[in-house]
Each structure stands twice: as structure tokens, then as C-alpha cells.
């Protein structure tokens, strides 16, 4: 995989996928195994995963349960809460036009990299488009459907739950068109880009909700940021119970030697990135109530004593002392 193809997205949308597959009689473990993803991401929606793995998981789920409209159903079912901090971030403004502007300005930072959105208004009609700029093909149309569903959720937050657009556009040949149209509650036509077309006057629609406070979320590293991407994928491997370099190399589709060379070009080593990731996740976990032994095992240590020694090297204190006085 080229460095430019290293694109991450949040794992939060994977929970609704698992729910729909289980409800339809499909095997959730088999689904996640096919995408090479740990089931534990269902409990950590802010984890970052490779965008191509999300594409593959949604595509596989759609085929597994025979539902071509599954991506649209997912976004409709989960609403903007399915997008975590990014979704909540869009509802802190006073009008729809500002929310859409915020959607494309903050997407790469809060949700996923390599994403292009545009808003244009001509002759009384507004057109909000979505596209993935990375060269990922398997599951691409399913991802566009998922995005269109969330875009409609944003619009309906301002226009009302019963509002419908003039049309939704989607590139390429579309199967299950009528089922998708029924879920989106919109006509679906072919277009050059995924888009929602609606009356431009709606851009001035006020936000009917009270302002909300948005918590912080980790920033998505830009496409091609090998070190930033590697640190997040190491965290994903820790959730899978893997701590070796081979797991990271497999995810990046690189040989072990090539990965080591690429990291060295950036002045880094796998072991240093592993320790940085472990320390960050350890501090986050120690702010919660999980037993220290459990945290140690989840970070890949075979013995809690090994974790205690490592943490003392990082922080100059034991995990228990740090938990009692994290700011000391």
C-alpha cells in the first residue's frame, strides 16, 4: 500500500452494522474476521480504522444479509449520534448553511481523511456533494450511500424529520434502487458524484435545537501520515491482542522489512511507536475504573508486573499511584 493510501476513519459506524447483521441472522464474528477487525472496536467507537477496512466490512455485511440498502439503513438507524463528536459538532451552529460548511471543514479532522465535500447554489437549488479522494474501490458505492444517509440526517435536523430533498444522486450502476429510495425517502438518480439536491432557501433554516457542548475527540491523522496512522493501527492491534510488528505490516499490506525501512525514513521504530501507544492507552484506561491487571492484559502484557515496570519507566510512578494522583 502506498503512503497516500493510508486513510483512517472512526470505528463508530461499525456498531450499527453489527446490530443489523445480528438482527438478520448473520454471523458478526465472521463478518469482522472477513474485514480483519477485532470485535472489541464495538466497545471503543472512537478507535480509528483503515477506511478500506470499513468499506470491506460494510460491503461484506450487505452481501451477507442480502440487503443492498444496508448502508442507507445504517445511517438512518443510528442518526448523527452514530458519527460521535463529529455529528454533535454539526449541531452547535445556528443555521443549516453553517452546519454544512462545518461538515466539510471538520470531516478530515474529526471523522475521516481523504474526504471532499462541496456546497454550491445555482438558480435556487443547492447541491451538497461527497467524494472519497483515495483510490479505494471495493465498497466505494456503499460508503457513498452511508454518507448520503448521514447528510440527509443533517438536513432533517434543521428542516424537520418529514422533509424530503428534490433528489439524491449517486455515481455508477445502482442495484436495489427502489429499496434505497424508500429508506432515504428520496428519488435516487445517477450523477457524477454522490449528492443531495434541495431548495437553496433551506440553507437559512435555523437550528431548532438548543446548543450542545461537544467533548474532545482525537484528531484523525491526514492521509499519508505514516507515523500517525501506524500509532492508531497499533492501538487497533492491541485491541486484537497483537503486539508484534507483523500485525501492523499485514494491515498496511507491507512486508516486515519494507515497514521497518519506511519507519526508519521517518526516524521511528516499531518498538518506540508501540511504547508510545501503550503509554497513551494506559493513561486513558487508568482514568477509568478498570482493574490494573485487566489494563495490563489489554495492553498486551502477559504479567501485570511487566506493565507496572514499564509504566514506572514512562511516568516515574506506579500505575496505582498515577491513578490516585494523575496530575502530580
Image (cartoon, helix red, strand yellow):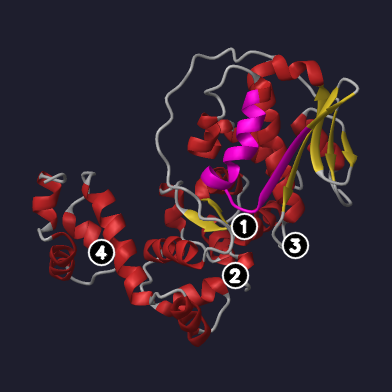
* Nearest the eye: 292 or 97: 97
User: Residue 257 at x, y = what percent?
Assistant: 49, 87
Q: Is residue 110 magenta?
A: yes
Q: Tell me which residue sits at (14%, 56%) in the image.
A: 319
Q: Tell me which residue sits at (62%, 35%) in the image.
A: 103
Q: Is residue 252 magenta?
A: no
Q: Which residues are magenta?
A: 98-119
Q: Given this view, does label 4 or label 3 mark the residue nearer the observer? A: 3
Pointers 1 and 3 in contact (CB under 8 A)?
no
User: Residue 86 at x, y = what percent?
Assistant: 53, 37
| Rendered image: mark on residue 297 | 4
Task: Work out whether residue 161 can be spotted.
Answer: no
| Rendered image: mark on residue 299 | none
Residue that mark 2 sits on = 3
User: Residue 125 at x, y = what percent?
Assistant: 86, 24
Q: Disc 4 or 3, which lies upstream in sequence?
A: 3
Can you say whether 290 is above or below 262 in the image?
above
* Nearest the eye: 61 or 276: 276
The local crowd at label 4, few if under 14, some if 14 to 19, many if 20 or more residues have their Cα within 10 Å, is: some
Residue 25 horizontal side relative to residue 267, left or right: right
Snapshot quadrant of residue 167: top right
Mark 1 vs mark 3, CA separation in Å: 13 Å
User: Residue 13 at x, y = what percent?
Assistant: 56, 45
Q: Quadrant of the N terminus?
A: bottom right
Residue that mark 1 sits on = 57
Pointers 2 and 4 in contact (CB under 8 A)?
no
Q: Given this view, does label 1 or label 3 mark the residue nearer the observer? A: 3
Residue 247 horizontal side relative to residue 36, left or right: left
* Nearest the eye: 97 or 37: 97
Amino acid at each position: 500500500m502506498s503512503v497516500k493510501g493510508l486513510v483512517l476513519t472512526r470505528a463508530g459506524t461499525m456498531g450499527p452494522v453489527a446490530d443489523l447483521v445480528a438482527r438478520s441472522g448473520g454471523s458478526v464474528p465472521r463478518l469482522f474476521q472477513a474485514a480483519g477487525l477485532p470485535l472489541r472496536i464495538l466497545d471503543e467507537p472512537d478507535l480509528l480504522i483503515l477506511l478500506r477496512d470499513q468499506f470491506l466490512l460494510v460491503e461484506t455485511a450487505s452481501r451477507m444479509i442480502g440487503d443492498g440498502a444496508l448502508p442507507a439503513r445504517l445511517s438512518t438507524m443510528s442518526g448523527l449520534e452514530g458519527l460521535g463528536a463529529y455529528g454533535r459538532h454539526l449541531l452547535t451552529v445556528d443555521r443549516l448553511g453553517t452546519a454544512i460548511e462545518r461538515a466539510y471543514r471538520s470531516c478530515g479532522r474529526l471523522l475521516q481523511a481523504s474526504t471532499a465535500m462541496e456546497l454550491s447554489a445555482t438558480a435556487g437549488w443547492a447541491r451538497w456533494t461527497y467524494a472519497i479522494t483515495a483510490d479505494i474501490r471495493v465498497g466505494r458505492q456503499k460508503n457513498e450511500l452511508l454518507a448520503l444517509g448521514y447528510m440527509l440526517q443533517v438536513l432533517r435536523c434543521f428542516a424537520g424529520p418529514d422533509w424530503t430533498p428534490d433528489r439524491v444522486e449517486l455515481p455508477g450502476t445502482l442495484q436495489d434502487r427502489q429499496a434505497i429510495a424508500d429508506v432515504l425517502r428520496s428519488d435516487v438518480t445517477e450523477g457524477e458524484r454522490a449528492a443531495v439536491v434541495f431548495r437553496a432557501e433551506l440553507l437559512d433554516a435555523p437550528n431548532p435545537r438548543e446548543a450542545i457542548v461537544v467533548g474532545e475527540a482525537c484528531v484523525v491523522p491526514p492521509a499519508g501520515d505514516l507515523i500517525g496512522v501506524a500509532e492508531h493501527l497499533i492501538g487497533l492491534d492491541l485491541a486484537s491482542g497483537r503486539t508484534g510488528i507483523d500485525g501492523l505490516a499485514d494491515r498496511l499490506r507491507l512486508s516486515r522489512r519494507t515497514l521497518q525501512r519506511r519507519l526508519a525514513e521517518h526516524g521511528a521504530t516499531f518498538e518506540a511507536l508501540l511504547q508510545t501507544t501503550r503509554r497513551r492507552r494506559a493513561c486513558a484506561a487508568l482514568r477509568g475504573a478498570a482493574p490494573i491487571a485487566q489494563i495490563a492484559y489489554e495492553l498486551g502484557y502477559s504479567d501485570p508486573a511487566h506493565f507496572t515496570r514499564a509504566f514506572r519507566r514512562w511516568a516515574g510512578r506506579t500505575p496505582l499511584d498515577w491513578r490516585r494522583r494523575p496530575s502530580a
